[in-house]
Amino acid sequence: MTKRSVARDILITVVILALAFVISVSFQKVFGIDEQITTLFAFAVFLISLTTRGYVYGIFSAIVSTLAINYAFTFPYFAFDFITPVNLISAVVMIIIAVLTGALTTKVKRNEEIRLESEKERMRANLLRAVSHDIRTPLTTIYGSAAALLEDGEYLSPEQKNKMLQSIRDDSVWLVRMVENLLSVTRIDSGNVKISKSPTVLDELVSSVLLKFKKRYPDRKVEVLLPDEVLIIPMDAMLIEQVLVNILENAVIHSEGMTRLILRVYVREDVAVFEVQDNGCGISKEKMQDLFLGYYEHKEAPADSQKKNTGIGLSVCATIIGAHGGKISAENVPSGGALFRFILRLEEKGNE
């Protein structure tokens, strides 16, 4: 366990025992009730065993509770008496409660960890199948075009050569983007990358995003709507750039019939809201369910096996925004098209 989790469990134990003691004193002094004090401490032991990890804190709280009841709330007061059968039975009962509750909660948590790990493995398998499907076509195109240029280059016209080279370049760029996204999502998910936030000027961020997007899609115009005032947001600028580029590219790839693409940023209370909206075909209900999970099932693979986006880019977006402590969502616009939205806090809280 980490130091933070140990400190959390210690704090929970101390707070619950202190509350139990204070309430017991109130019962005794104010209401003159002694009968329910043992039950109150037993409940405190149960809560501690339920909310902390392992058996140690529950058993410790059972021993402390037994000593507290024996010393402060049982005659003779302010003296230990373990000869009386009632006191011995109370001690045994509370220790049994602690052990059984600790065992139960440990088993439940372990089963939950196993379930989550199984779910991760299932998602990894689906992701691998989806990625394998998508990279096959560009790799085949690159191999075929390169082989044709090497073996039959002398028989090809300059136009044919340029077309093949263009195809090789486009597919290579697509594969590089795919690999970058895969590396980002797996490294952040595994905890090997820590988000390094620094104050970033919004206008500079958007200019960098548009420059990268323009290189890939020179014919696609992006309408930009930004606040009039200078907005500075704490973020890892390179990762947020990747998020915005991924969402814009997703709109180009999937928004059939799109004629308008809007990047909008505004302030709402203590957060900056980023929105990317298009007027294309929108998102189907089936895709909406798994939009940020990292894969799309290829139930309707095209006959020509053209490369498709597996959703890796959107999974990266969700991972990066989550690591920033923000939220990301998508919805269909009533007038047509899709709207992607994510939020980032304008000020850091605590030690983040």
Image (tube, helix red, strand yellow):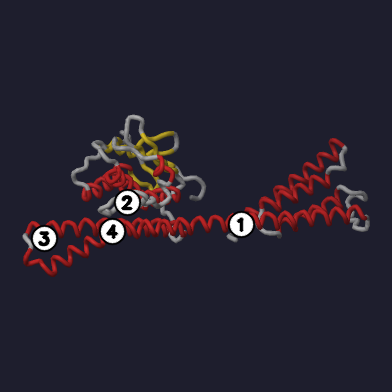
Is the residue 316 above or below the residue 221 in the image? below
Q: Are marks 1 and 3 in contact (CB under 8 Å)?
A: no
Q: Could one spot residue 264 in this view of the protein?
A: no
Quadrant position of residue 176: bottom left
Q: CA distance from mark 2 to mark 4?
A: 19 Å
Q: CA distance from mark 3 to mark 4?
A: 21 Å
Left/right of residue 62 with respect to residue 217 in the rendered view: right
Left/right of residue 45 with respect to residue 160 in the rendered view: right
Residue receiving disc 3: 161
Residue receiving disc 4: 175
Q: Could one spot residue 22 in this view of the protein?
A: yes
Secondary structure under badge 3?
helix
Q: Earlier in the sequence, mark 2 or mark 4?
A: 4
* Nearest the eye: 314 or 240: 314
Quadrant position of residue 179: bottom left
Left/right of residue 314 with respect to residue 101 in the rendered view: left
Q: CA distance from mark 1 to mark 3?
A: 59 Å
Using the image, tell me which numbered label, if any, was put on residue 32.
Answer: none
Residue receiving disc 2: 301
Q: Earlier in the sequence, mark 3 or mark 2?
A: 3
Secondary structure under badge 1?
helix
x and y percentages locating residue 25 in the rendered image = 82, 42
Pair 2/1: label in front? 2
Q: CA distance from mark 2 to mark 1?
A: 37 Å
Is the residue 9 above or below the residue 204 in the image? below
